[in-house]
Amino acid sequence: MAENTKPDKGIIEYIEGIGEIRGKKLIEVGVKTLEDLRKIDIQEVANKTGISDKLLTKYVAMAKLQQIEGIDKQYAEALVLMGADSFSKLASMNPEVIIENMQKYDREDIIPQVPALYEVMKWQEESIKQIVPDPIVKYGSVSVSRHSSDKVVFVDKELQDIPDGVTLSISKIYKRKPLVRLTCFSHQYIPAPGFRVIDRVYVGLEDIPANKKLLDKLTVRDGKLVDDLPEPEKLGLLAQQFPRVDLLRNIIFKHHMVVETVGKNKIKVSKPEYRLCDELKNKMLKKIMREVRRW
């Protein structure tokens, strides 16, 4: 895809909101164009310029999005603000939701005008072409629900909304739409009020750790997918977030784990040295609940 034709006036002209001071700092370390910005080592440039890695990550996302025809610096900023900060996220977002957000940003004068629905869908088609599938993974066929007016597969739930410790398994990888379908092992997760059991999630290949294949298990931690953690560690993460009697009873009686508090307001889950009898398990549950109620 050919990049939008723009006069070379420096990085300040290309990224909305970058400002003269930060723009000059980037130019001083050799980041003068969008192409330069896309290729930077974020941590290295952050150390050299004093610009936070969070801001640089945002600028890089805006630079990459401008590879798509029709997305200028203002639309790129708006897309990043609404969470469509990568090609896979842009491709998987409902186009009507994008339009709704654009209408809001138009009222706030962030964008010059609201794009038409067909323009947004065109962006999504082009964004899919920009994603390079992982060649080492075997791909399945696409057989999931699609939007009535488009061929984009939508994300059922954001990773950031899934509690730490939830286990997911790679159940399918789509070649034409480089997305990965993950199936949740919901038996490990007893939802707290306001949460629901997650059945399946769609994420971009870029969100999957390297060298993964079908049926591999992954764990959610800090809004990201990581290599599958040991069971006590996963259950400990869940217990820390949802210290409820139903979850703690499940961990103690079903998973046969030791649950205790360590330090200040912290729950630790570990394997026992020997099989615990029900009497000891009941005492453990009562003790941990007494301590939790004091928090």
Image (tube, rainbow, N blue to C red):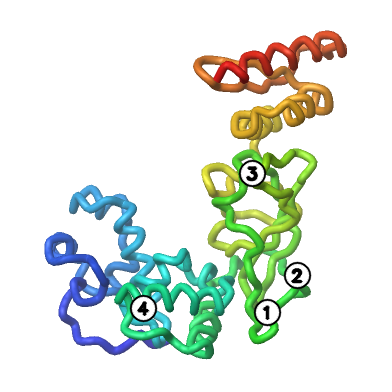
Between the residue at mark 2 and the residue at mark 1, the CA separation in whole angstroms equals 20 Å
* Residue 248 falls left or right of residue 124: right
> Residue shown at 66%/14% (left/top)?
290
Q: Which residue is mark 3?
A: 219
Of discs 1 and 4, which sits in the foreground?
A: 4
Q: Amino acid at mark 4?
A: Asp
Q: Amino acid at mark 1?
A: His
Viewport quadrant of the N terminus: bottom left
The disc label shown at residue 106, or none: 4
Q: Amino acid at mark 2?
A: Gly
Marks 4 and 2: in contact by CB < 8 Å?
no
Give the vertical position of 251 relative to 187 (above or below): above
Q: Which residue is mark 1?
A: 147
When asked about the image quadrant of residue 81, the answer is bottom left
Helix, strand or loop for disc 3: strand
Helix, strand or loop for disc 1: loop
The disc label shown at residue 140, or none: 2
Residue lying furthest front in this view?
Answer: 107
Q: Residue 37: x, y in percent?
A: 29, 67
> Residue shown at 68%/31% (left/top)?
235
Marks 1 and 3: in contact by CB < 8 Å?
no
Viewport quadrant of the C terminus: top right
